[in-house]
Image: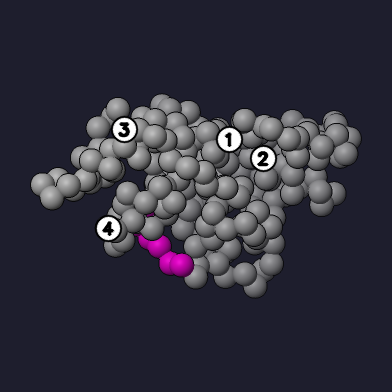
Amino acid sequence: MKYIHKKSPPQEFIDWLALRNENWEPEYDGMHSSIKKPLKKSLMEEQGYICCYCERRISEDDSHIDHLRPQEEFGWSALDYGNMLCSCQLELARNEPRHCGNSKGSWFNSELLISPLDPSCENRFFYSLDGSICPADEKDMAATMTIEKLNLDGEKLNRLRKAAIEAFIMDPMETILAELHREGMKEFYEFHTAIRIYYASV
């Protein structure tokens, strides 16, 4: 999980919200694609085109807007840009396991869900060469629950993380870490934090 520094929402979204009047109240479900498309693009850009939870590469066709605090319980936050993230898995292939936003669903617990908006989130997890993820501190119940509820340690994600980590295995550690910390990156590496944390530990 990589820390996401939230930026300003797109102007199209701001202007749409400003249309609110005594006869009309904007609703997330009623948002037109002309508003939702730049909104989603803005979320993908601020995340460096990786999933907010697992860090898999995302695109317009394979991602969806996820509300950290679910709309079902926190209706007031449905149009709060600060509550919006972009998660992978827009549509599930047959028998594809759910993970990230699709696995989280409407579950939310402020004490047990580690948020990618928390600057400390990156250091709450540890990654192994086989692609598996575990809490950096075995006593960290929030990390344990986050992994479980988002299915971050599933076979599919572990396999993809393993391949991403191994792609750097022949490079000197200093080169790897310098590349991952390169300034001005518009697209982060797939499983960016997993690669960084693994190689920083060896």
Q: Which residue is mark 4?
A: 75
What secondary structure is marked by label 3?
helix
The residue shown at (30%, 27%) is 34
Marks 1 and 3, the one that precedes in the sequence: 3
Q: Residue at x 38, y 58 (%)?
A: 69
For marks 1 and 3, give the CA distance: 20 Å
Q: Earlier in the sequence, mark 4 or mark 3?
A: 3
Q: Which residue is labeled 2 in the image?
A: 192
Residue at the extreme left of the image, as rendered: 23
Residue at the disc numbered 3 = 35
Circles 2, 3 touching at the beta carbon (< 8 Å): no
Residue located at (40% from left, 62% from top): 108
- In the rendered image, residue 163, in percent from the top left (x then y), is placed at 68, 34
Query: Is residue 118 in view from this perspective?
Result: yes
Q: Is residue 63 left or right of residue 164?
A: left
Residue 142: name its quadrant: bottom right
Which numbered disc, 4 or 3, marks the residue closer to the eye? Answer: 3
* Amino acid at pointer 2: His
Label for residue 48?
1
For the residue labelled by badge 1, is the local secondary structure a helix, a strand or a loop?
loop
